[in-house]
Structure formats: C-alpha cells, structure tokens
Image (cartoon, grey):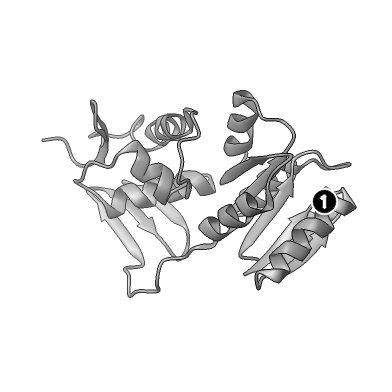
Amino acid sequence: MKILIIEDDQETADYIATGLRERGHTTDVAATGRDGLFLGTEQSYDLLVVDRMLPGLDGLSVVKTLRGAGLTTPVLFLTTLGGVDDRVEGLEAGGDDYLVKPFAFAELAARVQALGRRPPVTDEPTKLTVVDLEMDLIARRVRRQGRKIDLQPREFRLLEYLMRHAGEVVTRTMLLESVWEFHFDPKTSVVETHISRLRMKIDREFSPELIHTVRGAGYCLREPE
C-alpha cells in the first residue's frame, strides 16, 4: 500500500515509516498539517496515518477538510488523547480507527493491514434505487423525489450500505465493520449519531419513512409495510 504519514515528531515518523517499509509498503511523510493536506489532495494514497496534535493545522482539521473534499481514503489517528470524548471527536471528524500513544508497532501494523483491505472488484450497478430514493455511485449524488440531498462522505457510505441491503436487517456490528471498517467496538454512539443524521436528511421532509429501527436487532431501509 501507499501510505501517507502526517506526524510532526521526526523520531516517531521515522519509526513508523521504517517499520511500514519493512513490511512492503510505500510511505511519504509530512511534518505539518498543511503539508499533509497538500499531499493528501495532490496524490493518491491507500491509507493515511495522522497525528492529532500537529503544528498549525491540527490532525482533526486536516481530516475534516479531506473528507469535505470527498476523499474516502481510510484514516488511522495517532494520539496521546485516549478518552471516550476524544475518540468520538476523532471518529466524527472522519477517522476510521484510533490508536493511542505509546503503541506497539505490531498493533499499528495490524490495524494498517485491516484498514487497507479492499473487496475484490466486481461488476456492480452504478445506481441504487429504493422506492423514490436514488443514489448515483459514480457522481456520488443522492436524490429523493427528484430533490438533491447533500451527504457527508461517511453518511454516503452508510446510506450506500443500507441501500445495498434494502429490506434486510443490518446490525450495529455489521455497520461498524462495513462502513467504518472497525473490527472492534469503539464504545461510542457513532452509528446511532450517523443514522439520526441520515433520517433528518432522508426522511424528515419526505414520505414514507424509509429508515426503520428494528428493536433489539438493528436497522432496515425499506418501504413501510
């Protein structure tokens, strides 16, 4: 994989870069948030490893800006802040995983490997439709009853998963693994928060409601029975 490391501590950056290269990855290193933002938008990477505490433009701002620009590359945050609120803030900013310093390199390498996994390329439809909800996967556009609905990158991924599994009950664990690529429970309300945001955008001004909670099981995108 080609990996961008945004880390201002040179010793830590060299340690990560050397270890990843020894495992066959290609790495670039940026020492500031602005340099990382530039590289992240100008080049294509398979994964970003981002320190939260960066001089000038901090890591959260870097990732928020990249997500706002439509970049969906997985992000692994590195930080000395390990509280629940800190994890929530990182995930809400667009992070996919969170590793607290100091860390064992073996754990970082395992998380990098998990985030870098990609499903095999298959012939898939470029448009999804459920009732009057339409998603264009190429243009990254969503409409309902012909009206454009603006979604953040993570909201788009969540809705895409629900639409691909329309009529099926999907659990919180399924969403964490497939949308956030988490293979652990982050002990946050990140799923519930994003489902709530989707409902506000998809269902609040339209009828019928499409996103349903299946008590004790999960969620289902379908037309009411």
- Residue 150 seen in render: no
Residue 223: horizontal and vertical position, in percent?
18, 40
Image-quadrant location for residue 174:
top left
Q: Is residue 162 shown left or right of residue 93?
A: left
For the N terminus, the image quarter is: bottom right
Q: Nearer the viewer, residue 182 or 30?
A: 182
Residue at left 28%, top 42%? Answer: 170
Q: Nearer the viewer, residue 87 or 64?
A: 87
Looking at numbered disc 1 in the image, what kind of residue is underneath it?
Answer: Thr
Residue extending farthest to the left is 225
Q: Is residue 7 left or right of residue 128?
A: right
**Relative to residue 16, is residue 218 depicted above or below?**
above
Crowd around label 1: few <14 · some 14–19 · many ≥20 (10 Å): few
- Would residue 15 be seen by someone viewing this image from the given angle? yes
Residue with the mark numbered 1: 12
Does residue 211 appear to the left or right of 178 in the view shown? left
User: How many labels were placed on the picture?
Assistant: 1
Q: Secondary structure at mark 1?
A: helix
Which residue: 62% across, 57% down? 109
Residue 14 against residue 101 in the figure, above or below: below
Quarter of the rendering occupied by the C terminus = top left
Give residue 124's position: percent from left, percent from top. Answer: 32, 70
Left or right of residue 24, residue 139 in this image: left
Q: Residue at x 35, y 31 (%)?
A: 205
Name the foreground residue: 109 vs 49: 109
**Where residue 45 appears, x then y in whole percent?**
65, 66
Q: Position of residue 93 (x, y in %)?
A: 62, 39
